[in-house]
């Protein structure tokens, strides 16, 4: 009679101790996250409905900011440009990263060297990269246009100095910069595909293309899903690349949402309105990612 | 357990007592005894003015030490706004640009210094910009004005007549083309990529022009002329300047261009760079900026140009006992003594009349009469007239500048778009 509650108590104490140990491991990370991310994000949802210029209190203005945003042509331009970037950047990076991974997954002399080369842009300072690419793209003296002229193009594009070509230029650099990182993820994913599947496919007489479609791509499904989600969020949030390469110009041709938020908040001191736009960006990212999870789950069920 | 809690509470109380004791002592130490003021500035390595003013003031008021606090030049206002909001900003802080003066003044982050302003000489330029609600909230200690720098050596080589202060913009454009044709290499002029190189002059010189009006038609002739110079090859194309990160210091200092419109801060830079070898050694001078029409040209008239003053304001969180010293510092910095100290290191103070002799005594500063005229005589209008909407409107106009200069939009269409954006997004939002 007396031993039962004692055992239960002991087990209870054990559970409590495990929980405490678990929490103590989580705590340093969580405290930093709560202090530097969670609390500011929660506050953001309040500031979005106020007019606030940093000094003094924020004044509650209800839905005024939302109304302003819906009638704001610059917001629509920024949204359109962000979508433009996203729609091209995701598939291009995905295909380039996968192709690189397949290429560098073979037994090849100096494969480590080539993998490093492909990864290099990702770890190089974005400011230095932007400067070099800007010079390459220079309409008058840049080597890219010199090559195009050599190939017989009479009027090569103005790249970052032309409203029509600035976004393609930024997309090219964005893709080039990030493909190395996603290549690494794909390389890791390729290691998880069992070799027997390829052997079986070969025995059945599948050619290289059929093996890619029937074995590699289905086998990479979890990796691909992860890469697409990360790429989507990264594309919607693109900021540093644009800021240092074109600063949103010429005109508003490369203005993207995160840069618009920065401009409204830190340049014009309209922190309330900047918060509203941030929430719009958050909802877009959240919505698209949620949709991707749903599609992925439905796909894996069938 | 209980006892340790009491101990912690006791320790906390003791610490807070010590802390309040400290600040209490600080409050009292104001009457008479030695004092320390803190002053915010940026990039002290390349901006010696803050140290010059701090040292000069300390020499005149041995009881007061001015301690400098350095901020990042590019993010000065962002950091200052954050520090002010957190209550950690220095006692005195510089108004780096006029663009953000409204934010500080409207945000109640400046002490009324009308008494300091009323004691300053009439020749101190730029005070008006710091006035709001009938009071003065900061005083200017430097006032740069835009002038036309020219390379005498290249002019002589081309056999083109030097500027004489009588130029309108058409004379300037014609000379730029003539120089380009005759020099066979260096361009006639260099136009830096900033929006102010076009918009600043258009706003200052066109009668009735106002950013606040949301009517930007006044920009049109100025842009047409610049585009014409660009297309004629008399100046480097905007796109080449942005993609290659050209600096104006090397374009003019390395003699790639014979003329350049730039703020008077470049006098000190060029003088220094010619001394250190960063710039070529050549003969140069500066003339008043070209004018809209003949009514303001010639050395008997007052040329119209633009430039924002740089001012000093006082943080309202300053200890009451230090306020008098802080005001004395402002009076010194904006007054004749401060102006002379600044001119001694090649900086253009707000009161240029008072320092003409000091300034032109420096080695490497041109000695001709036209340079002296350009330095002292000018009507300098603000680039960023103070208002609630200035920062947002300037952002709109910055997009207009890149769209026009890159050739992405024609002048008329870009101005119409800017006017629509100004109306919908800023003025009537």
Image (cartoon, coloured by chain):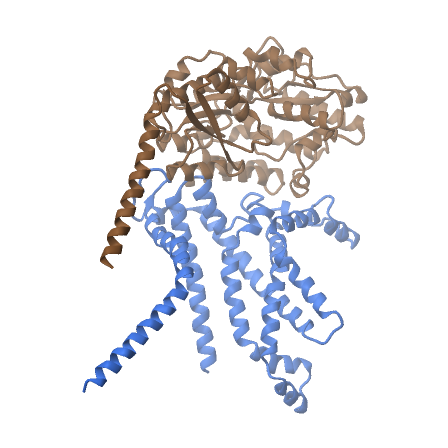
Chain colours: A blue, B brown
In which quarter of the view is residue A298 placed? bottom left
Residue A166 vs residue B127, the one in the foreground: B127
B19 or A76: which is nearer to us? B19
Q: Position of residue A191 (x, y in %)?
A: 61, 77
Q: Is residue A78 above or below residue B31?
A: below
Out of B137 and A224, give the one closest to the viewer.
B137
Query: Residue B153: x percent and y percent?
Result: 77, 21
Instruction: Tell me the quarter of the image containing the C terminus of chain B.
Output: top left
Is A85 positioned to the left or the right of A290 in the image?
right
Q: Position of residue A73 (x, y in %)?
A: 45, 46
Query: What residue do we see at 47% from left, 17% from top?
Result: B332
Compared to residue B132, the image places residue B361 above or below, namely above
Which quadrant: the N terminus of chain B? bottom left
The quadrant holding residue A35 is bottom left
Question: Would you place residue A225 above or below residue B10 in this image?
Answer: below
Q: Is residue A221 left or right of residue A128?
A: left
Specify whether residue A87 is in view. yes
């Amino acid at each position: 009679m007396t031993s039962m509650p004692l055992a239960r108590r002991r087990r209870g104490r054990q559970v409590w101790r495990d929980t405490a140990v678990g929490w103590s491991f989580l705590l340093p990370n969580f405290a930093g996250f709560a202090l530097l991310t969670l609390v500011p994000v929660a506050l953001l949802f309040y500031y979005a409905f106020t007019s606030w210029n940093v000094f003094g209190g924020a004044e509650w203005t209800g839905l005024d900011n939302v109304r302003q945003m819906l009638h704001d042509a610059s917001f629509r331009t920024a949204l359109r440009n962000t979508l433009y970037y996203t729609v091209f950047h995701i598939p291009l990076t995905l295909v380039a990263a996968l192709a690189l991974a397949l290429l560098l997954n073979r037994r090849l002399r100096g494969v480590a060297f080539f993998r490093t080369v492909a990864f290099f842009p990702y770890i190089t300072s974005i400011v230095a990269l932007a400067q070099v690419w800007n010079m390459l793209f220079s309409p008058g003296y840049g080597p890219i246009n010199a090559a195009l002229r050599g190939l017989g193009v009479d009027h090569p594009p103005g790249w970052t100095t032309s409203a029509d070509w600035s976004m393609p230029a930024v997309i090219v650099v964005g893709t080039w910069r990030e493909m190395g990182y996603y290549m690494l993820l794909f390389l890791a994913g390729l290691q998880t595909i069992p070799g027997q599947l390829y052997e079986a496919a070969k025995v059945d007489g599948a050619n290289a293309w059929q093996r890619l479609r029937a074995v590699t791509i289905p086998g990479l499904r979890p990796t691909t899903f992860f890469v697409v989600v990360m790429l989507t969020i990264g594309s919607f949030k693109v900021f540093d690349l644009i800021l240092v390469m074109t600063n949103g110009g010429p005109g508003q041709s490369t203005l993207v949402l995160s840069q618009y938020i920065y401009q409204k908040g830190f340049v014009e001191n309209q922190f309330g309105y900047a918060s509203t736009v941030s929430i719009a960006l958050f909802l877009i990212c959240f919505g698209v990612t949620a949709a991707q999870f749903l599609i992925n789950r439905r796909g894996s069920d069938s | 357990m209980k006892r340790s809690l009491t101990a912690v509470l006791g320790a906390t109380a003791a610490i807070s007592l010590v802390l309040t004791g400290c600040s209490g002592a600080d409050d009292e130490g104001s009457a008479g005894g030695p004092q320390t003021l803190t002053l915010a500035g940026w990039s002290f390595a390349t901006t010696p003015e803050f140290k010059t003013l701090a040292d000069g003031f300390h020499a005149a008021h041995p009881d007061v030490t001015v301690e400098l606090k350095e901020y990042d030049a590019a993010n000065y206002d962002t950091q200052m706004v954050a520090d002010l909001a957190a209550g950690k900003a220095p006692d005195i802080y510089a108004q780096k640009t006029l663009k953000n003066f409204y934010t500080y003044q409207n945000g109640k982050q400046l002490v009324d210094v009308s008494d300091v302003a009323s004691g300053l000489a009439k020749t101190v330029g730029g005070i008006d910009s710091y006035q709001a609600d009938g009071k003065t909230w900061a005083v200017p200690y430097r006032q740069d004005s835009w002038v036309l720098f020219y390379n005498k050596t290249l002019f002589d080589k081309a056999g083109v007549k030097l500027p004489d202060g009588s130029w309108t913009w058409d004379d300037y454009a014609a000379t730029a083309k003539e120089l380009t044709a005759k020099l066979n290499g260096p361009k006639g002029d260099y136009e830096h990529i900033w929006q102010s190189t076009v918009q600043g002059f258009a706003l200052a010189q066109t009668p009735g022009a106002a950013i606040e009006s949301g009517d930007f038609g006044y920009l049109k002739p100025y842009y047409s002329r610049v585009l014409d110079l660009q297309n004629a090859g008399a100046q480097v194309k905007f796109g080449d300047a942005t993609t290659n990160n050209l600096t104006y210091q090397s374009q003019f200092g390395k003699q790639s261009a014979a003329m350049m419109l730039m703020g008077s801060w470049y006098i000190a830079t060029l003088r220094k760079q010619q001394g250190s070898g960063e710039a070529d050694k050549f003969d140069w001078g500066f003339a008043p900026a070209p004018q809209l029409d003949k009514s303001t040209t010639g050395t008997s008239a007052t040329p119209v140009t633009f430039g924002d003053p740089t001012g000093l304001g006082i943080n309202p969180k300053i200890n009451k006992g230090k306020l008098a010293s802080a005001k004395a510092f402002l009076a010194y910095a904006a007054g004749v003594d401060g102006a002379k100290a600044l001119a001694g290191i090649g900086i253009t103070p707000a009161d240029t009349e008072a320092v003409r002799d000091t300034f032109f005594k420096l080695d490497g500063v041109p000695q001709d009469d036209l340079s002296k005229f350009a330095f002292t005589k000018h009507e300098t209008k603000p680039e960023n007239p103070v208002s609630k909407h200035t920062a947002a409107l300037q952002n709109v106009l910055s997009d207009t500048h890149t769209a026009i200069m890159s050739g992405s939009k024609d002048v008329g269409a870009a101005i119409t778009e800017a006017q629509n954006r100004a109306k919908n997004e800023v003025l009537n939002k």
